Amino acid sequence: MQTVEELCNLKSHEGPVAARPLCTRVQDPSLTIRAQLRSRERRASECVRSGAFPWSPCQETDGSPVIDPWILRIREESVLDNAAPHAGLNESTTHGTSLTAVSETAMPAADPREIDDDPAPVKKARRSTSHLKAVPETLAQRNEINAASDRFMLTIDRSHAFTRDDLEQLGRTFLKQESLPEKFLGFVMVLLGNAFWKRQFLAVPFERRMLLLPHCMKHAEGCPAEYDQFGLDCEKCGACSIADYKVRAEQLGYKVLVAEGSPIVLKIIVEGYIDGILGVACLNVLEKAIDKVLLAGVPSYAVPLHSGDCKNTSLDESWVWEVLDKYEPLPSPETTSYIPLMRAGNKLFTEDFDRLLPRIRSTTPEKARSPLGLTEDIAYDWLANGGKRFRPFITLAAYDALTREGKNATGDTVSFSDPVCRVAMAIEAFHKASLVHDDIQDDDLFRYGRQTLHRTQGMGPAINIGDYLIGLGYKLVNSCRGDLGTDIACDIIESMSNAHIRLCDGQGAEMAWKDSPDWAMTALDALQIYALKTSPAFEAALYAGLRMAGPMDKYNDLVPQFCRQVGVGFQILNDLKDWDGDNNNKMVAGQDALSLRPTVLLALALQSATPTQRQEIRDILESNGEDTLRLARLRRIFTATNAFQSAEQLVEKSRARAEALADSVESEALRKLLYFFIDTVLAEEPNSGKAPSDNSMLISLPILAQV
C-alpha cells in the first residue's frame, strides 16, 4: 500500500532513508517535520459553529409536512444561537504585502512566563488562487480526468484522513503525471478527494447521509421559491433540477439542505444525525469548505459546478446520480475518525447529562424557579448548552488514544465509564465558570449567541453562578476517586487548581493593565498574559485524559509545553478574529481593541509605530468618540505597522513549535490527536478579512461553505 509521500516521491532533508511527510511545507525548512499522517489545515472554519441553516420538511402521504426530529432540534438551537442582533462591522481589509520581522523578544517560550529569541517563520508573499479553479470545458475531458483520478488513488493508504496540504501535493503530482495544466488544480483536488472517500461514502446508509445543494442551481428568473432564515424552500415546480435531486434523496432517506452551505453541518454530524455528505458546489465555494469535517474523518463526495457565476449554473448530473441512490456496504470502515469521540463528548451534555449530574434543588419547574433552586437551574443550563465542548472531547480523546489507540470510524459508537465521563464534564464546568467571570470582568455583551449571564441575571447572580460551576467541577472529580483511585483524582484536582491560579494570574494582569495602561507594552508582555489566560484550560483537559489512562512520566513536560504553544496561538487568532466580529460570542467587531485590552496586536503596533502613530493610538483608545470611526483609524495604524502580519507570524511560530512537540510523542494515536488538536484550535476563519495563506492552496474536499 503506497503512502501519500511515496506516491509523490518526496524526500526528506534529513537523508535518503527518512520519509518526509507530504504536508510539511517543503519550501520552508524552518517548519517541523510531522509524522506522515498528521492532520494539518490552514484556513478552515471552526470545528463547530452555531447558526441558522436551510431545512426542508419531508412529506406525509397526504401531502402535509412532517419535520424530522433532527430538523426540529437543530432548528431550535439555531434560532436560539442567533437571537442576538449582529452589531459588528463587516469591513474587511488586506493587511499589506510586506512583512515586518517580529521582535526577537516577542516569541512564545518554553517557560510560561518567559519568551525566547527564536526567529519567527518567514511567510512569503500571498498569492491568488483564482487561476487554479478552471473546470475542463467538455464532458469527455471531465470524465477522463475523473476516471484517471480514481486510478491514481487506488494505492493510497486509507487508514487516516488527509488534509488540504496533502491534497494539493497529490493534485500537483497528478497534473504532472497526466500532462494537465495547473489551472485545473482545484478541480483535480476535488476529484482526488472524491476518489479517496467514495467507497466509504457509498457504505453509509441513505438515512445517515446529507445532500447539500446550492441555491444557484435554481432557475434564476422564474423560481417561485421563497427564502427565509433557513434558506431556500423549494416549491418543486420542475423548472430546475433541485426538485429532482431533493425528491429522490428524501425518498431514500437523506437529510436535504438547499443552500451554499452552513457552518452547522459538523454540529449536525456530532449530534449523531448523519455520517456522510454529498455536496454540490462551485470551486469558489469548495475553496472555503469546512476542512475539519474532513480532518474529523467524515466520508464526503462533491460534484463541482461548471462555473462560479451563481446564476443558472450547470453540472454533470450523471455524477450526482452515480452516487445518490447507490449503497455498497463495506466489511469494515477504512479510515479512522474523531466523530465517535465528538459524539461521546456531546452525549455527556445531552442524553447522559441528568444521569451523570442529577439535579438536587431544581428537580421540578416549580423548584427551579424558587430562590433555592434558581442558581442550580441556571448553572446546569449554562453547563449543558452552548459552546463546542472541545475540552471534554480532548479529555475523552486523550484517554481513548492511550487505552484503545484511537481506532474509531465515523459510524462507531464509543462509550466510556461514568467516572471518565464525569471528569470530562468537570473540565467543561471549569471552562464555563471562567467564561462567566471573564465576561463580567470584560463586560462582554454576548456569549454563544446570547446575552452574557451578567446582563440577563445581574452581576451578583452571575458571579455566584460562576462560583457554583467551580465547586461543581471539583465535586465531579472528587466523586470519582473510588473508581479512578485517590492518586489519580488528586493529581487531576491539583492540575485543575494550578490551572485556576494561573488563569487568575493572567486575568489579573490584564485587568491591572486596563486600569493603568503601559504604553510601552511589548509583544513579550502580551504573550506572557496569553500563556497564563488561555493555555491552562487546554492543559487541564489534556492532562486529565492522559492521567486517567495511566502514569504521566512520559508526558509531564510535554503537556504544559504543548498547551502553551497552542493556547498562545489560539489567543492571537482570537485577536485577529475580533476585527471581524464573532457570530458565536461577542458579535461586535473590534470590541477587544476598543475596550483597552493588552492584546498582542496592540503591542505589535506600539512597538513598530512612529511617535506620531503611538500618540494617535493613545488618543483613539482614551477617547469616547464614535466607535466606527475609532476602529477605522485604529485599523489603519495596525495595517501600516504590519501588526496583523506580525501576529500571523507568531501564530505560525506557535503552530511550528506545537508540531515539533507532537512529533516527539511515541504513541501514534496520541501524536495524531495532538496534530488534530493543533489543526482545530489554530485554524483561522475563512471570512477573517485577511488575504489567503501563501503556502497552501485553499481548495478542500467537498463539503460546504461558510455563509
Image (cartoon, rainbow, N blue to C red):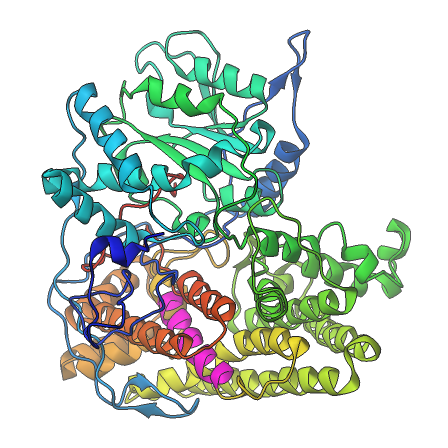
Relative depth, front residue between 225 and 321: 321
518 left or right of 328 in image: left
Please name the predominant secondary structure of the magenta segment in the image: helix
Across and down, in percent, residue 485 comes to 78, 82
Q: Quadrant of residue 639?
A: bottom left
Across and down, in percent, residue 248 comes to 51, 15
Q: How many numbered discs, if any?
A: 0
137 left or right of 70 in image: left
Q: Quadrant of residue 620?
A: bottom left
Q: Residue at x 38, y 92 (%)?
A: 114
Relative depth, front residue between 58 and 86: 58
589 left or right of 669 in image: left
Q: Which residue is drawn at 33% across and 24% down?
A: 216
Whether the magenta-drawn stretch holds residue 573 is answered as yes
> From what the image shows, is residue 628 above or below residue 312?
below
Q: Is residue 83 visible?
A: no
> From what the image shows, is residue 141 above or below residue 201?
above
Q: Residue at x 26, y 41 (%)?
A: 152
Relative depth, front residue between 420 and 113: 420
Q: Is residue 219 visible?
A: yes
Across and down, in percent, residue 309 comes to 22, 27
> From what the image shows, is residue 511 above or below residue 128?
below
Whether the magenta-drawn stretch holds residue 597 is answered as no
Instruction: Please identify the quadrant where the C terminus is shown.
Output: top left
Q: Quadrant of residue 421?
A: bottom right
Magenta stretch? 558-575
